Amino acid sequence: MRFFDRLPLPLLVLALPSVLAAQDAGSFEVVIDTKVSAMMMFVGNEDKLYIVDKAQGNAEQIKGHSAWGSVWDMNTNKVDVMDIQTNTFCSSGMHMPNGSYSVFGGNSAVRIGGDKADGDNWDSILQDFDGSKAIRILSPCTSDEEFSDSKCQWYDDPQNPSLQMQAQRWYSTAEPLADGTIVLMGGFTGGGFILRLYPNPDPTIGASLTYEYFPNTQKKTPQNLQFLFKTSGLNAYPHAFLMASGKMFLQANLSSTLWDHATNQETPLQDMPNGVVRVYPGSGATAMLPMTPANNWTQTVLFCGGSDMDDRSWGNFSFPFINTWDYPASKDCQRITPEGSGQYEQDDDMAEGRTMGQFIILPTGQLLVVNGGLNGTAGYGRNNALTPEGQMPFDQSFASGPVLTPGLYDPNAPKGSRWSSAGFQASEIPRLYHSSAILLPDGAVMLAGSNPNLDVNTTDAVHFKTEYRGEKFYPAYFAAKTRPKPEGVPKVLGYGGDAFDVKVPASSYEGKGNDAAKSAQVNVVRPGWTTHGMNMGQRFLQLENTYTVANDGTITLHVAQMPPNANLFQPGPAFVFVVINGIPSKGTHVIIGSGQIEEQPLSARTVLPQSVLASDDAAGSASTNTDADSKDGDSSGSSSNVGKIAAIAGAVGALAIAIVGLFVCLMRRRNSKIRAGIAAGKANRKPTLNLGDAGYKVAGAEVYAAVAPRSPGFGGYSAPVGDGDSQVFLTHKGSDAWSHSQRDSSVSGWDAPVQGYGAGYGDYPPMHSPPAAPYGYSPSHSANPSYSDFHNPSQSPPPGARYGP
C-alpha cells in the first residue's frame, strides 16, 4: 500500500500540495473524502454536491448511528454528513421544478451486514427505517446559508403518508413530464439479482410492474405498464426518456417502445440489436445526445456497452448462473431516434467492452464515458450457481477488470472516428458496482463511490474496497489559459419569449473576436441524478444565438429562450455554459420554467437580431493564466477551491506533514472507537429522530402535514409488506413464498399458466424465451443464504458447460 493510501482523506489536501498543484487536462485528482460511499449523487446548485449511500455500516456517525448521506461544499471543500432515516439502497431520484430533489423507494430496513433488521421495519443499531415506499425531499442550500438549519436538511419522515409511494419500488426509474410531475415506474418489491424466477412462471413475482405519479395530484392508483410485463426479468432501472411529443421512450431487456403515459398505450419499436442488455445488471452507458439548433433539437438516444449474455446465464433472483467475471462486456454502440425512424443505427464501437459505464455530457456537447468493468455485470453476492461462498475470485463482485481510462465520444464526428482517449490518464481507483459520476459546475467530472460488497469493507483482503475517495477528472478544455467569463446570464429561462444578452469580455478569451463570436454556443446542461451507471434526467440543449462584436473585442451574445416545448427539456434546475472556441465557462445555475408543477407557460419562439461583426483587429486580450486559474474559471461563479487550498497547502507543507502523525493517531483512535461502538451494538438504543419542521411544501403541491415524533411501534405504523428483508439477494422457492404478491392473470401481456405473452406483444425475442427444458433449480427461502442452501450438484448446469471465453 502506498503511503498516501494510508492517510485519512481529509489530510490529503494538506499532505500533498505538490500533487494537487500539478494536475493537468486529462488527469484525475482526489479532492474529497465523501464520508459515505457515493452510490447516488446530484448537484444541488453552484455550491453543493449531495451524496447518498445505502444504509450500511459507514464509520462516519450522525445522531448515534452510521451515516448514509453527505454533502460537499465546493467552495470550502468541506464535507458534512447528513441524516437520512429510511434505507435509500438502490433508489431512484429526480429534480422538482423549483430546484428541490426527491429520492424514491429503496430497500427494507436492514442491519449492518445487510441482513434483516432486528426490529419490525427498523433496526436498533443502524437505525434505518423501511425505505421501499419512502419519498425523501431536499431543498439545496448555498454556502451562505446556515447548513444546520432544518430547511437545508433532508425531509425524510417514514410516518408521513404524503411521503410514501403507493407501491414498493427498489431499482425503479423516475422521469419528469412537461409540467414537472414525475412518473415512477417499475422496481423490485424485495431482494434479488434480477427480477424473475427461472423458469419464469409469473412476471409479477417480486416485482412492481406499474407506474404512478409524484405528486399524485390526480389521486390516481398505480397502473400496470405492459412494457414491464414484456421485459420481465431484465427491467430493473428501465431506461426512460420523455420525447418531444410527450410520449416516453422506454428500453429494457431487448425491447424498446414509445409509451403514451396518458392513455397507457404503447408503440413497439425495434428490439436492441446484437442481443445486448443495457439495463441493470448489464448496465450499459446510456444518454440522450445533445439537442441543438443544427439538428432541430432532435432527440436521439445512444447506448454503449452492457452484456450480451444469453438469457439463461442471467439466472434469477438469487444470482447469475455463470461466472460472470469471466464473460467479456460488450463494446457495441447503437443510436436510435425514437420519434424519427424508430430503428437502431450501428454506431462506432467503444475501444473496450464496458459494463457499468456511465455517460457524462460535457458542456461542449461531447460525451465522456467513465467507470465500469471489462467483464461481468453489476451486482454482488456471496456465490453464484457455479462458485460457492469462499471461492469467489473477486470476493463478492460479479465483475472484474476495472476500466480506468475514460473515453470521449464526439456525436458530430464522422462515423469511424467518434471515439478517442488521447491525452487521458488512467485513474488509480476502480469504480465498479455502486459507483457514480456527474458533471460539476466548473466543467470537471466528479467520480465517486464503488462498493461491490454486502456492507462496508475497507480491508486489503478484498479486491475492490468500499470507496470513499471522490476524484475530479479534468477534460481537455482545462488546458486553456483562460475561460470565458460571461456576464448577464439570467437565473430563470422560459419556454419562448424575449431574447436576453450575455456579454463576454475580451479579457476572457483569446484570438480574433469575430472567430470567437462565430464559435460561441450557449448550452443548457442538466447533470441529472446519478446512480447505477445512469444519470436520470440528464439533458443537453443548445440555445439559439446571434452576436455583436465590438471593436474592443467585447462579444455580446443575443440569446433565445428555451424552445417553446417543455417536453424537450422539462422544467427545473440546470446550468448554462457559454462556450467560446471550444472552451466552456463555469456553469451558471438557472431554473427552467415557472418553478411550479403546472402546465408551463409557453411563448412564441424567440426572434433574434442579425449578427454584427467588428473590424478585423478586434481580438481577445486574455493574459496567460495559471493552471489553477483555468480550473477556477469564471470568478462570478462557484466551484471547488482546490487550487487555492493547494496553494495554501504548499505554503504550509512542512507544518502539514509535521501534524500528519498526530492526525493519523487521532483519526485511528476515533475510528477504532466508532467501530467498537458499532460492533458492540446499541440494542437498547431508542431511535433518535429528526422530523424537521411542521411541514414541507413542494411547488405546485399540497403542504405535507406535520406528524408527531415516533419510535418503532408508535402510532400503529407498520411497514409495507415486502418480499425481501435483506440486501442479500434472496432465494425463492416458488410462488407460494410470494403469496402476497399481486398477480393479475388478466393482464394482456402475460398468460399466467403458459410461459409466454399474449396478443399484442408477439413472442419473446428468441434469445430471451423461456427454455423448453426447465432448469432444475429450486432454492430454499432464506434471508441469509449460504451456498449450501441452494446448491445441489444434481441441479447444477450440465457438467462441462462453458461460458465466456
Image (cartoon, rainbow, N blue to C red):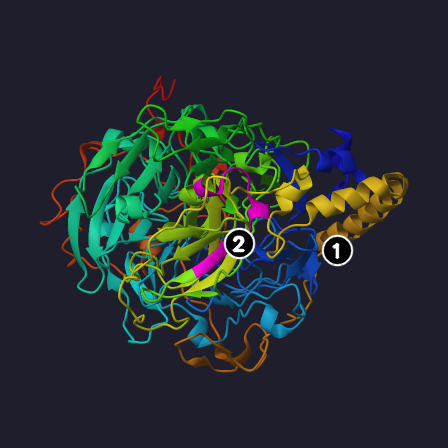
Tag nearer the camera, 1 or 2: 2
Q: In which quarter of the image is the C terminus?
A: top left
Contact check, label 1 and label 2, Cβ < 8 Å: no
Instruction: Depth check: give the residue in front, 78 or 503.
Output: 503
Residue 474 is a magenta residue: no
Q: In which quarter of the image is the N terminus?
A: top right
Q: Residues within 10 Å of mark 1 (few under 14, many from 20)?
A: some
Residue identified by numbered label 2: 486
Above or below, comparing residue 532 to residue 561 in the picture = above
- Sequence-first disc among 1 and 2: 2
Residue at 61%, 35% (x, y): give it. 28
Instruction: Depth check: give the residue in front, 103 or 141.
Output: 141
Residue at 85%, 42% (x, y): give it. 651
Residue 457's quadrant in the figure?
A: top right
Mark 2, secondary structure of its residue? loop
Q: Where is residue 329 in the image (x, y as percent from the top left)?
A: 40, 28
Q: Of the numbered discs in the image, which one, if any, rests on residue 677?
A: 1
**Amino acid type at mark 1:** Gly
Seen as rendered, the residue at the extreme left is 759
The stretch of residues the image draws in magenta is 501-514
Q: Position of residue 661 (x, y in %)?
A: 88, 41
Q: Where is residue 456 in the image (x, y as percent from the top left)?
A: 62, 45
| Number of marks in the rendered image | 2
